[in-house]
Amino acid sequence: NACAGYERVLYIGDSMGASASLMFAEHATRVLSFCPQVDLYLSSIRPSRSNVWFQRFKRCLTSGLEKSSAAVDVHTGSWDHDRYQASLLPPAVIKHIVHPVDSHRLALALDGEEKLLPIIKKAYDAELAIARGEAPAKPGSSPLDSFAPWQ
């Protein structure tokens, strides 16, 4: 496991990179996923693979996500296809954020509006604060919760 030596791990991905960030989310503490492709059989943008491969991909992606305790934000635009793909993810595990961009090229559009970097920086700063003990890992908890009562 490449992430085993790290206390906090932030994954960021766009499109199929977003899919990978969800597939391996169990190894992260924070995930920012922009327009993930979940069901490649129904996807508008897909590789040349068999239906069996598409089904296996979807199972691996959702399985990795369901095993994760990471905070997961899935960003999509208003394009119906991307919103549908996000709807296939377990709602109890993700936070779905919809931006007023009618395109799969959401990260590019957010970058052009100078909105992408602040989203990434906020997640990075939060992970850094948790690693430094300046913020709780889970909302409503305290950094001191990790210590035994006798310490």
Image (tube, rainbow, N blue to C red):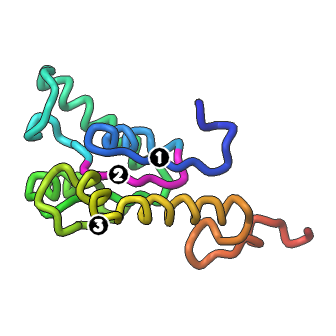
SS at circle 1: strand
State the image coordinates of residue 72 (x, y, percent, origin top left): 41, 57
For label 2, the residue is 33
Which x, y percent locates residue 142? 69, 75
Q: In the figure, is residue 63 to the left or right of 126? A: left
- The quadrant of the picture occupied by the C terminus is bottom right
Query: Which residue is nearer to you in this view: 148 or 125?
Result: 125
- Residue under numbered circle 1: 11
The answer to whether residue 86 is magenta is no
Against 124, is 100 above or below?
A: below
Badges 1 and 2: C-beta atoms under 8 Å apart? yes
Q: Say whether residue 23 is left or right of residue 3.
A: left
Please rate how many residues cluster around mark 2, counting C-alpha atoms within 10 Å: few if below 14, some from 14 to 19, many from 20: many
Mark 1: amino acid: Tyr
Dot 2 amino acid type: Ser
Q: On the image, which quarter does residue 45 sit in?
A: top left
Q: Is residue 65 left or right of residue 7?
A: left
Position of the N terminus, as image quadrant, is top right
Give the spatial CA distance, label 1 vs label 3. 17 Å
Label 2 or label 3, whichever comes before in sequence order: 2
- Report the magenta residues as a range: 28-35
When the figure is inspected, residue 65 is found, relative to residue 59, above or below; the finding is below
x 25%, y 37%: residue: 58
Q: Position of residue 77 (x, y in %)?
A: 19, 61
Q: Which residue is mark 3?
A: 97
Q: For numbered disc 3, what is the local secondary structure?
A: strand
